[in-house]
Structures are given as structure tokens and as C-alpha cells.
Amino acid sequence: MRVPNLSLLSLAVAGSLTAALPAYAADWNLASPYGDASFHTQNTKQFAEDVAEATDGELNITVHSGGSLIGHAEIKPSVRRGTVQAGEVFLSTLSNESPIYEVDTLPGLATSYADAYDLWQASKPIITQMFAEQGLMPLYAVPWPSQGIYTDFELTDASQLEGLRVRAPNINTQRFVENLDGIPTQTEESDIPTAFSTGRVDAMITSVSTGDSMAAWDYVSHFNNANLWLPKNIVFVNKRAFDRLDESSQQAVLAAAAQAERRGWQMSQEDGAESAEALEANGITISEPSEELQSQLQAAGQQLFDDWRDRAGDQAEALVDRYRERQAQQGE
Ligand code: PCA
């Protein structure tokens, strides 16, 4: 009996397989802490669809929402290692790395979408550089609607916050709560319902969007539209994974990212308006801060800003100067 030459046979099989495959196909995983109810996740899923379409399926990005693949704090380290190719995080949670990441949670600095966009333009070069030093590349950033205060009573005076356990999504919000003599608790968005139902928190600071997706009306009755700041999510990729794509796929990713950024800023505004309506429809009273409360919040905010300045360093100061210059030029 003649024994077939196995090595030649396997070469032939391998050859025909290669010929059947497109030039290069890649599958990326993108991890996000936010659930499917969030407009951020909807935008990121649309981004993934746009990339698949533009590359004719050669780059498939699977979005793992709601922290289902990895927890929020592990997303950036995992993308750095390359165990997942892309991620989305709440930018200000990186503040333990640098005060640069706190600029979009500084009270009174940028409280409209136009100002927040200027601040992002002023921040982008330095954030891109800091990400590049870690082998990462930002794709786009999108703000949440402005942050306000949810309570189960009508908030008219900051003294009502004394001793209250207030849920906060990042360190600067925690500091802000401390400046108001409240007791801050850092809680992920997805843990909000449990935090309230187990009595771990009495109040929270977040946007109308998160209040709506987390059914705030189950736990609180009032939203004070304090308009503290418009913090952003950032979507980014492992640079080695990006470099491995062929040129046309790289272009497709960048084009879809630019489109996702434009769409996301629009969605944030629309979702803000719709979420406010949904909150009211479910019985939440929305009010603007009284003059008294406004000046108390401003004082707590000023303290936060001054403390930030003390630890910010030259690069962070330069960023704020760049932002102010942009604003001054536009005002001319
Ligand atoms: N929602 C997220 C981040 C900011 C926001 O509006 C949260 O509260 O966790």
C-alpha cells in the first residue's frame, strides 16, 4: 500500500485554505461598562456596525456592554495588554493616573455643549500623547448630559446634604460631595439600583440619562439640575491591533470614529432632553438650583478647582490656558 506524503498533503490543504480567505480579517472585542440602555452603548454599537460595513466584514468589532466582559477598572489595563483590542471608559475615572483626566469634571469650567467641545479639542492632543505612551490610541469621546443631584426630598439648601451618603461616579465628584459635608460612595452605574435598595446610598450625582436608564424614580423623588459639568466617555484601541490592520481598514475605523464622535455629541443632547421627560413622566420633580443653593455649590466647586490647581502641574494648567484661549478667540 502506498502511504500518501502527509507533509505535501497538508501543505496543499493549507494552501487552498489561504486562498479561500480574504487578505486579512480581524475580530476585535470592545469592552464597555455601560449597559444597552445607554445612548453611549447605542452609539458604540453603531460605530461597530459602520466599521463592519465599510470594511465589508473584514473587521468585526463585538461590543461587550454593561461590564459583561471585564469590569470598568480593568478595561484600560486589558486593552494595554492587548487581551481585548478596544474599550470604552468614563474618562475621569483615570484621574489616579493624571490630573489631566479631571479637566472635564471641574465645576464651572465648561457647562454647555459648545464649551465642553472646546475643552475636548484643547484636551485631545495631550490625552492622545498620554494614551500613545501606553500603546493606546483614542478613537472618539462623547459627553454625558450635565451632572445634577438626585435626592428623595426637595433640595433647597446645601446643608441638607450634610451626612447624606451620596453616590458618585468618580473621584472629583466624591471630593465635591465631601466639600458639601456629604459622605461620598463610589458606585458603578450598573450598581446604582442595588446601592439604593440595600440602603448603601441616599442620594446620587449623575446625569438625567443615567437616572432614566437606572429607573431613578424607584429610589428618589427629585432631580436638581445643578449643571455641574459634562464629563466624557472615551473609546480607544490597542495601537498594535490597529497597526495590524491593512490601510483601508485603518481608514474605515478612523472615519467611523469621527462619525461616532459627531453623532454621539448630538445623541447626548437628544438623550438629555428625552431622559428629562422620562424622569418627569415617572414622577421625578426636576428643579433648578435656588440662588442660595447655587452659591453654595459654587463655593464647593471653587474649592475643588483650587485643590486641583495645587496638584495639577504645568501640563494640566497649560491645557486650561489653551481652552481659555480658544474661548477668547471665539468671543472676538
Ligand atoms: N453617567 C455615568 C457617568 C456620568 C453619567 O452621567 C455614571 O453616573 O456612572
Image (cartoon, helix red, strand yellow):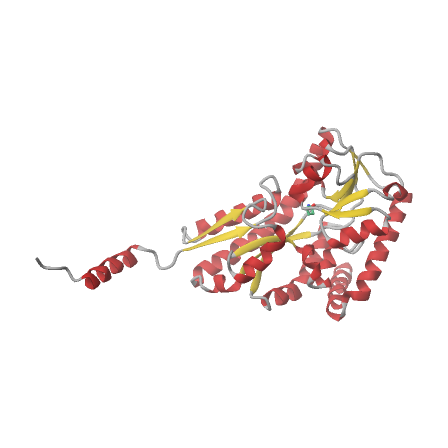
Percent across and percent down for residue 143 are 67, 50
Percent across and percent down for residue 146 are 74, 46
Position of 12 relative to 291 (above/below): below
Question: Image quadrant for the C terminus?
Answer: bottom right
At x 81% / y 47%, what residue is drawn?
A: 183
Percent across and percent down for residue 296 are 89, 48
Query: In terms of depth relative to the viewer, which is nearer, 85 or 1?
Result: 1
Q: Is residue 276 in sight in this rendering?
A: yes
Check the image and name the residue furthest to the right. Answer: 292
Q: Is residue 147 in sight in this rendering?
A: no
The image shows a total of numbered marks equal to 0
Percent across and percent down for residue 327 are 76, 60
At x 62% / y 51%, what residue is drawn?
A: 72
Query: In terms of depth relative to the viewer, which is nearer, 64 or 60?
Result: 64
Q: Quadrant of residue 312?
A: bottom right
Query: In terms of depth relative to the viewer, which is nearer, 202 or 227?
Result: 202
Question: Image quadrant for the N terminus?
Answer: bottom left
Query: In this rendering, would 137 be left or right of 211?
Result: left
Q: Quadrant of residue 314?
A: bottom right
Query: In this rendering, would 266 be left or right of 222?
Result: left
Position of 256 relative to 35 (above/below): below
At x 80% / y 43%, what residue is drawn?
A: 165
Check the image and name the residue furthest to the front. Answer: 1
